[in-house]
Image: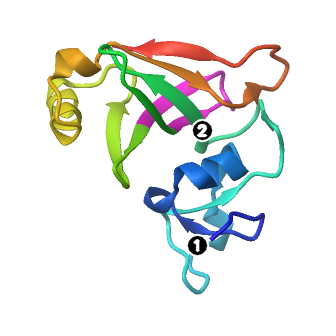
Amino acid sequence: MKSALQTRKPIDALTSEDLDACTIWEFAMDEEGDDGQDETSVRPLDRSTIPGDASSLSVAADFVTADGTQFVGIVGLSTDEGLEIACASLFAGGTHVYAVHGEKTPLRYKTSAASELGKAPSEIYPMRFTLRALLEGEAAPRSGIFN
């Protein structure tokens, strides 16, 4: 199914194609309880930049692991109190691999993510990312490193 502004789906059902169609997704909290919707439902945000006053957005990103493997995925972030990155998920083999949990990912999560990818944690971390959308007011895509 091609993504459109009317698209609603669980966040763990997002695909690379969805991210190509729309780089910024938001939780549809105001629609929770509607037929077929729950707390995991996301919808595309109809804008090309990440707003400076938002919470709980999922933004398309490109990732490069320590061993050079490239992935597409999402970075969960909020901007309502400055930029805060909450999590990151890689798309691998049709599944989401939750690779970053908070500012400092505990070793058990790193080990689990690496195992799901068939790698050692040292082959994954540090992992670089670049957002596919600009933060409002910025001239270049934000990038960073998850250690």
Disc 1 secondary structure class = loop
User: Mark 1 or mark 2, which has the lower sequence index?
Assistant: 1
- 138 over 1 or under it: above or below: above
**Could you say where residue 101 lies in the image, as x and y percent from the top left?**
34, 32
* Range covered by the magenta-colored residues: 74-88
Q: Nearer the viewer, mark 1 or mark 2?
A: 2
Residue 7: percent from left, percent from top: 68, 69
Q: Secondary structure at mark 2?
A: strand
Q: Residue at x 62, y 27 (%)?
A: 131
Task: In this rendered view, identify the residue nearer to me: 65 or 35.
Answer: 65
Q: Determine which quarter of the picture holds residue 102.
A: top left
The label shown at residue 60 is 2
The reply to whether the magenta stretch includes residue 145 is no
Q: Is residue 54 above or below residue 30?
A: above
The amino acid marked with disc number 2 is: Ala
The label shown at residue 32 is: 1
In the foreground, 134 or 123: 123
Please rate how many residues cluster around mark 1, counting C-alpha atoms within 10 Å: few if below 14, some from 14 to 19, many from 20.
some
What secondary structure is the stretch in magenta mostly built from?
Answer: strand
In which image quadrant can residue 115 be found? Answer: top left
Residue shown at the point (51%, 21%) measured from the top left: 129
